[in-house]
Amino acid sequence: MRSLLDEYLRQVDGWESDRKYLEEHLSRWSRTLDIVSHVPSGSRILEVGAAHGALIFLVKRLLNMEVAATDVRRTENPRWLRRFEHEGIDFRFWDVVDEESSYPERSFDVVLLCEVIQHLTQGYPRTIDAVLLKIGRVLKEDGLLILSTTNMASLYCRWRLLIGKTYLENETDLRLYTAGELHEAMARTGFLVKSTDFFDYWGEGLEKRTTTERSLRFVHKVLSLAVPGFRDGYIIQALRAPIEKH
């Protein structure tokens, strides 16, 4: 997988910064790819907030799915767009908070919203509800939403608050969510939660952390065995509820 991603990233200049981001997210993407691998062959898959497109590229190359991608307008777009064009990936600009989608309703079997929701404008529940409603419109009936994000209720976030720091360690994060908050938002917007799986990634780069952080990581691992909701992140699979017929 890494060699395939290197091939993809090196298609344009400035790939080094994308490679760093990739290293930080590869373990999370592996979980998403495993879920998508069980989707029926020939499904149409849209990634919302695709950024440089590495995840949706892997879906296309490894799983041979029909794919599309969206992202907001930003300075990196010109070089990212060259990759999408080279790989034949249908890309469209879509600010999912402030704009309506240009895709027809019921266009996709699966929508990926991976490591995106924490970067959206604050305003829970209004903003999140609006985003989920827009995603629901482009999903087919019984279509699958795969959402992954950092866990606000993780032990790591709790520890940072305990020592007087913000739980928002990443400067691009605007708001983290508990799984329960997103379950409630999905229920309000026509989704049926199928499963929620918690996972860890705080240990990535552990050799660079302090002795205290390493000790806390050991405690974290032990407690997370008993309480999965203490883990660093989670992936929710939710189905678009059947459309009511009048």
Image (cartoon, rainbow, N blue to C red):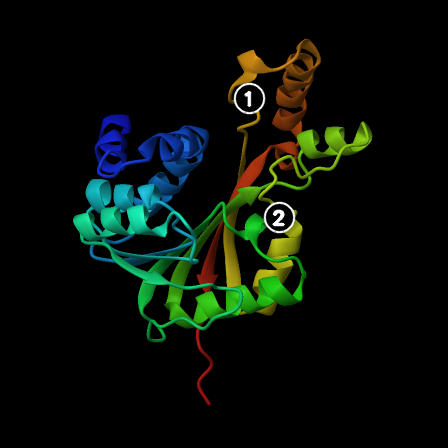
* Residue drawn 70% across the image and 37% down it: 167
User: Along the line of sight, which residue is nearer the eye, 41 or 209?
Assistant: 209
Q: Are marks 2 and 1 in contact (CB under 8 Å)?
A: no
Mark 1 secondary-structure assignment: loop
Which residue type carries mark 1? Gly
User: Along the line of sight, which residue is nearer the eye, 110 or 98?
Assistant: 98
Mark 2 secondary-structure assignment: helix
**Cα gap from disc 2 to disc 1, whole angstroms:** 21 Å
Q: Is residue 120 visible?
A: yes
Which residue type carries mark 2? Ala
182 sits left or right of 91 in the view: right
| Residue 174, numbered label | none
In the rendered structure, which disc, 2 or 1, sits on the residue that comes first in sequence? Answer: 2
In percent of width and height, residue 154 lies at 66, 35
- Picture layout, residue 229 above or below residue 118: above
| Residue 203, numbered label | 1
Task: Answer few, some or many: residues within 10 Å of disc 1's Cα (few below 14, many 20 plus, some between 14 and 19).
Answer: some
* Residue drawn 27% across the image and 41% down it: 58
- Picture layout, residue 204 above or below residue 14: above
Residue picked out by circle 2 = 179
Pair 2/1: label in front: 1
Task: Answer few, some or many: residues within 10 Å of disc 2's Cα (few below 14, many 20 plus, some between 14 and 19).
Answer: many
* Residue drawn 35% across the image and 58% down it: 110
Q: Number of labelled discs?
A: 2
- Picture layout, residue 97 above or below residue 19: below
57 sits left or right of 30 in the view: left
178 sits left or right of 161 in the view: left
In percent of width and height, residue 168 lies at 67, 39
- Picture layout, residue 70 above or below residue 9: below
